[in-house]
Every structure is written in structure tokens, then in C-alpha cells.
Amino acid sequence: MKFEPKWSGRGTLYVLGALRIAYGILWLQQTTWKVPPDFGLARKDGLYYWTGEMVKYSFLSPHKFFVESVVLPHFLVFAWLTLLTELFIGFSHLLGVVSRLGAFLALAMSANLLVGLARHPGEWPWSYLMLLGYALLFLSGHPGRTLGLDGWLSRRLNSPALAGRVWARVLGLLT
């Protein structure tokens, strides 16, 4: 008898749900050192320091140019965007609500980290690849529909009363 894994089985869905929750906790934990109101600008540490490191270690010239010419001169705007985006990613995955949108944003943030910091001597580049891989995994399915609020939301969006509405279809894609 040949064993064939069943990737769509109930156990797999619960494992993916647990991984999604852990991924959300990881993103939320990473917001704890991005401290407003100046995000390390005054002391040249924290998020400000790591943004500067991207200028030194980015492996794509256009990325380096953007960080140096746009992000750093407008650091506080981008710092707030970073904090709010990471909070959204974290809560989206933790609660399983609009989790595909959270996964898309995590993919973009992870790609930025990979490009900007993978060459940094104090960083482990595989961690950025894992962040990216989890984002791709969650983007490829509907991770919040098991152990998350997306399951409840998708049932409501697929009800006969809402099924034909464009906004309900769009929101259903994000769950």
C-alpha cells in the first residue's frame, strides 16, 4: 500500500492555521522595537539604524537609491507606515481576518527586508527567505478560514444576499 499525503486534509488546515497564528505573533513581536514618536532617530538606533543599514547593504541599486533618497529624508512618515503595516500584518494573521491581504503586505515587507538586509554581516539571510516563503504560502490559499475570522466572514460573503455584489467578491478574495 502506497502512502499519499493528503494536503487538503483537516489536519493540514489546522497546522496551517497554527502557523498563521505564529506568523502573526512574530510580526507583532517585531513591532515592539519600532518605538514612536521618533523610531530611534534621535539616538540613531532602532528602526532608524536599520533603515540606514539598508543603504549600506542593499543588493539592488534602485532599492538603495530609494531608501537613501526618499525614505531617509522622510523617515518619520515611512517609520509610521512601517509600524502600522506590521501591526496590520500581525493582527491579520493572528486573528485570521483578511489574511490574504495581510499575506500580500507581508510578502512586500519581507521582500524589502531581503533586498535591503540579506547581505548584512549580522543578519541571517535565510530568515528573510522564510518570512517571504510563509507569506507566499498564506497568499496561495485562504489561511484565515481555519482557526480565523475569515471562515465566518467568507460564509457571510457567500450568502445569497451578498453573493452577487462586487465588494463582497473583492472582500472574499482577501479572506
Image: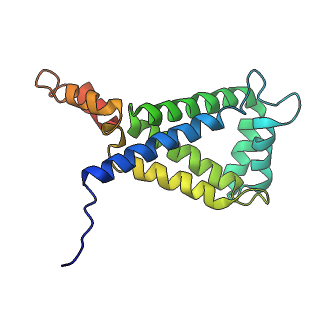
Along the line of sight, which residue is nearer the eye, 49 or 145?
145
Q: Choose top left, top right, bottom left or bottom right for residue 9.
A: bottom left
Q: Please say if 45 is above or below 15.
A: above
Q: Choose top left, top right, bottom left or bottom right for residue 167.
A: top left
User: Looking at this rendering, what residue extends furthest in the right direction?
Assistant: 43
Rendered residue at 67%/50% (across/down): 63
Q: How is the image coloured?
A: rainbow
- Could you say where residue 135 lies in the image, as x and y percent from the top left? 47, 48
> Left of 49 or right of it: where is 125?
left
Question: Can residue 170 be spotted in the picture?
Answer: no
Rendered residue at 55%/51% (across/down): 131
- Could you say where residue 21 lies in the image, as x and y percent from the top left? 46, 40
User: Looking at this rendering, what residue extends furthest in the left direction?
Assistant: 160
Q: Choose top left, top right, bottom left or bottom right for residue 57.
A: bottom right
Q: Please say if 43 is above or below 5.
A: above
Along the line of sight, which residue is nearer the eye, 7 or 108?
7
> Left of 150 or right of it: where is 157?
left
User: Looking at this rendering, what residue extends furthest in the front direction?
Assistant: 1
Question: Can residue 100 be spotted in the picture?
Answer: yes
> Left of 110 or right of it: where is 1?
left
Along the line of sight, which residue is nearer the eye, 149 or 160?
149
Q: Quadrant of the N terminus?
A: bottom left
Q: Please say if 127 is above or below 102.
A: below
